[in-house]
Image (spheres, helix red, strand yellow):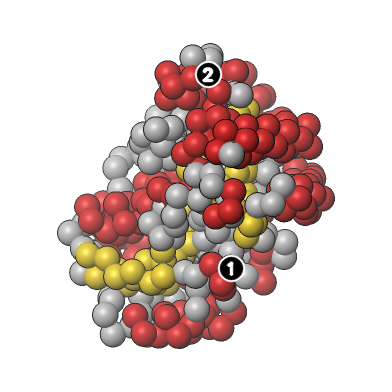
């Protein structure tokens, strides 16, 4: 199983499974911006090695200052971490929920973090007939059973945003809520959807952001949390010392200044995602029209194809796709793929066409 450790992008496992070198795969299983990393990252890695003899700033002041200015929120409401994964775990340990309301399907690390902190889970189902959009009545029904909500916004694996009606309810502060906005950078007019600024002042809202997806630096590990200063202080007390290394701090500070990269990334996605949706639907696949840089789709029952069959066939072709049936709430027909550059996307479509022809022909 390619998702042996719970994620896509595991090239070492792919190498073991399919006998190809790690760099011999076209990876659609992880959702990185194919335009990145920004060019400034290469310069920092080339020149910054001289400075790793120094300890990093334990308060991450320069990067927090840049984030404060860019997001228009106070520095004392920002905590930088070793990727969003650290912050998901840290938030659960700070809040210590007894019962957390999770959307199904959603990112598995929410549940893992809650269990590690000793809490239980209340399932809030997302339905295909609603394009996996969180429904207000389901959130309202869960309020009496949970003491924390933990939602992806946009959600992974569906790529769908939380509706304005549900966001308005969460902003009221009746229930503590954590919003994972790891992919919000990819959303057009993100300021209209993000609750970053509200979280900086609210006693009941935490917003998490990843910097690895949009800037394509997953090997660096970088993310940040926005919350009321009182909660940030509690999180700082539990955070491991030197969590954010020197190179990560320098890279994070530099990429935030690259406005040209941000503009070109959003232009690429605006052009490429509709094209890829159209191509997938022309193959007869049922595509969820998400807001970000990945797409969830399913193989119709009539095809008789499962995602595990598809993943094996595609892997032998050197193309990695995500088995979305591993997300609680999805069945064996669901798959997730990243949106990449046109040449790569053409290879994906050609590979899927070959796979569907072979598997349906064999079934017949």
Q: Position of residue 5 (x, y in %)?
A: 36, 36
Q: Nearer the viewer, residue 175 or 166?
A: 166
Q: Which residue is mark 2?
A: 22
What is the secondary structure assignment of the residue under circle 1? loop
For label 2, the crowd category at 10 Å Cα-Cα, with few meaning under 14, some 14 to 19 and many 20 or more, is some
- Give the total number of marks visible in the rendering: 2
Q: Residue at x 52, y 51 (%)?
A: 334
Say which quarter of the image contains residue 173: bottom left
Q: Nearer the viewer, residue 246 or 136?
A: 136
Q: Position of residue 260 (x, y in %)?
A: 79, 44
Labelled disc at residue 13? none
Q: Position of residue 354 (x, y in %)?
A: 68, 32
Identify the mark nearer the N-term, 2 or 1.
Answer: 2
Judged left or right of residue 220, residue 103 is left
Q: Position of residue 317 (x, y in %)?
A: 61, 24
Q: Residue at x 49, y 70 (%)?
A: 127
Judged left or right of residue 93, residue 283 is right
Q: Which residue is mark 1?
A: 131
């Amino acid at each position: 199983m390619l998702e042996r450790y719970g994620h896509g992008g595991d090239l070492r496992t792919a190498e073991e499974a399919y006998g190809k070198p790690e760099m011999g795969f076209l990876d659609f299983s992880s959702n990185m911006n194919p335009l990145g990393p920004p060019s400034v990252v290469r310069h920092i890695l080339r020149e910054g090695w001289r400075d790793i003899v120094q300890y990093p700033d334990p308060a991450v002041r320069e990067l927090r200052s840049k984030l404060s200015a860019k997001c228009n929120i106070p520095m004392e409401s920002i905590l930088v971490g070793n990727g969003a994964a650290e912050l998901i775990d840290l938030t659960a340990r700070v809040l210590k929920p007894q019962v957390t309301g999770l959307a199904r399907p959603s990112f598995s690390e929410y549940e893992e973090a809650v269990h590690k902190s000793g809490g239980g889970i209340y399932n809030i189902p997302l339905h295909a007939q609603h394009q996996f959009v969180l429904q207000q009545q389901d959130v309202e029904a869960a309020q009496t059973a949970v003491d924390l909500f933990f939602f992806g916004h946009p959600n992974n694996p569906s790529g769908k945003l939380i509706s304005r009606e549900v966001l308005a309810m969460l902003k009221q502060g009746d229930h503590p809520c954590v919003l994972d906005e790891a992919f919000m950078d990819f959303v057009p007019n993100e300021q209209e959807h993000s609750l970053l600024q509200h979280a900086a002042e609210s006693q009941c809202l935490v917003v998490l952001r990843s910097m690895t997806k949009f800037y394509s630096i997953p090997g660096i590990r970088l993310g940040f949390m926005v919350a009321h200063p009182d909660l940030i202080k509690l999180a700082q007390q539990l955070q491991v010392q030197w969590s954010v290394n020197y190179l990560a701090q320098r890279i994070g500070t530099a990429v935030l200044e690259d406005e040209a990269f941000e503009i070109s990334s959003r232009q690429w996605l605006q052009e490429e995602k509709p094209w890829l949706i159209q191509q997938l639907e022309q193959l007869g696949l049922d595509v969820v029209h998400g807001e970000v840089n990945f797409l969830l789709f399913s193989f119709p029952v009539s095809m008789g194809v499962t995602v595990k069959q598809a993943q094996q066939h595609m892997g032998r072709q050197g193309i990695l796709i995500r088995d979305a049936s591993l997300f609680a709430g999805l069945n064996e027909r669901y798959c997730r793929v990243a949106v990449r550059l046109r040449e790569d996307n053409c290879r994906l479509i050609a590979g899927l066409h070959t796979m569907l022809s072979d598997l349906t022909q064999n079934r017949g």
